[in-house]
Image (cartoon, grey):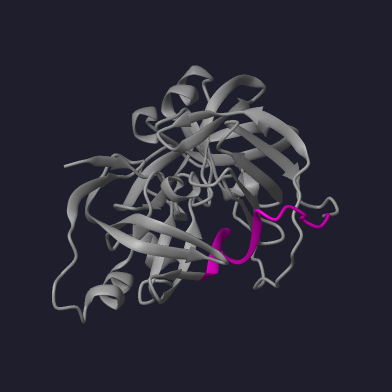
């Protein structure tokens, strides 16, 4: 039975008062901004620094400076509302301990410690003076991850062919897309994450959360029931285990769907891991057919561009 890492650190609850080091005065727990529903626009462009990326499974890491030191390899995780630093990096840099927080991941809730970062920089973009959870690198699959707190005002392009990530300022003016093999889909935001509503699995309308930190795409129970509840024969399934960044696991069933549509794009023979994981409830999607769209599907494109500020996603098709 395959075991798949799944980097969906999706929410941080209020700080705990028991256990861990005392809070650091004046240090904030960064939270993504509240964004209004999206409007349709056919423009999207990324200008900024192209950063060489490394591939972990189908996920991509970039070099990040922590307190001016590094670079350290961080996964880009659009499904996480908070950035995370590896415990090894925290120990190496002797980062001050912060309060404990409740982390909501794919396998449930965990109480984790935080550390204080004076500065976190990727390309020309920088965050200062904030707390991040510290988790073991063996579960992260990297030395840390970049979440929505670091990406909320950015435009990020993942080039799966060139293995580069370009991070740009989303405030810059946009120019119209001209390539015939480019499709732009409008998203909405929930807790900072991009959620596509112009998507279907089979003929079933779905909500698709863009999750670049997940190796595999997950479907919820509502989607499974909508697709298979009235069929005489159940689908062929393969059991698997999904591993959270905290090291906890959750059982899932892999099912191959004939097609999935995202905007005007149609993907054939898409494999989903079906599991009722907590993130769906956090996004308000527990009772609505939905998927967490991982890099197994995103990597089928040449490039995927995420504009967190404008709530746009651009897919560049392979030739």
Question: Residue 71: image x %, image y %?
Answer: 60, 21
Q: Position of residue 181 (x, y in %)?
A: 65, 53
Residue 130 visible (yes or no): yes
Q: Is residue 62 left or right of residue 10?
A: right
Residue sitting at x 75%, y 45%:
46
Please give the name of the residue rendered at 28% of the width and 63% of the height, measured from the top-left corner.
276
Q: Estimate the x, y position of residue 125 in percent, counting from the top left.
A: 73, 37
Determine the image quadrant of residue 281: bottom left
Judge by depth and name the residue closer to the eye, 243 or 268. Answer: 268
Q: Residue furthest bottom?
A: 230
- Residue 26 in sight here: no
- Count up the numbered dots: 0
183 horizontally vs 197: left or right: right
Q: Overall secondary structure of the magenta stretch? A: strand
Viewer-proximal residue among 173 and 101:
173
Question: In the picture, residue 136 is in which quadrant?
Answer: top left
Q: Residue furthest front?
A: 319
- Quarter of the picture containing the C terminus is top right
Counting from the top left corner in percent of width and height, residue 50 is at 70, 31
Q: Nearer the viewer, residue 126 or 277?
A: 277
Which residue is the extreme one toward the left? 233
Q: Is residue 182 magenta?
A: yes
**Region in magenta:** 175-198
């Amino acid at each position: 039975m395959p075991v798949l890492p799944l980097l969906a650190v999706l929410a941080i609850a209020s700080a705990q008062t028991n256990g861990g080091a005392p809070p650091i005065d004046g240090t904030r727990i960064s939270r993504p901004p509240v964004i209004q529903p999206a409007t349709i626009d056919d423009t999207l462009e990324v200008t900024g620094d192209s950063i060489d990326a490394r591939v972990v499974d189908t996920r991509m890491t970039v070099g990040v400076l922590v307190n001016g030191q590094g670079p350290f390899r961080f996964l880009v995780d659009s499904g996480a509302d908070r950035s995370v630093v590896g415990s090894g990096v925290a120990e190496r840099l002797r980062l001050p301990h912060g309060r404990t927080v409740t982390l909501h991941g794919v396998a449930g809730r965990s109480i984790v410690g935080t550390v204080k970062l004076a500065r976190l920089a990727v390309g020309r973009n920088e965050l200062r003076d904030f707390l991040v959870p510290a988790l073991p690198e063996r579960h992260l699959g990297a030395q840390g991850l970049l979440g929505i707190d670091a990406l909320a005002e950015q435009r990020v392009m993942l080039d799966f062919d060139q293995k580069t990530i370009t991070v740009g300022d989303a405030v810059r003016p946009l120019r119209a897309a001209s390539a015939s093999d480019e499709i732009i889909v409008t998203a909405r935001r929930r807790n900072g994450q991009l959620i596509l509503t112009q998507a279907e699995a089979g003929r079933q309308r779905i909500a698709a959360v863009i999750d670049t930190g997940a190796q595999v795409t997950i479907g919820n129970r509502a989607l499974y029931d909508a697709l298979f509840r009235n069929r005489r024969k159940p689908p062929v399934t393969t059991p698997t285990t999904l591993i959270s960044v905290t090291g906890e696991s959750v059982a899932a069933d892999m099912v191959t769907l004939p097609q999935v549509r995202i905007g005007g794009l149609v993907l054939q023979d898409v494999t989903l891991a079906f599991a009722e994981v907590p993130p769906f409830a956090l996004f308000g999607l527990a009772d609505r057919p939905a998927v967490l769209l991982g890099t197994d599907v995103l990597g089928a494109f040449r490039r995927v561009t995420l504009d967190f500020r404008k709530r746009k996603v651009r897919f560049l098709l392979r030739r």
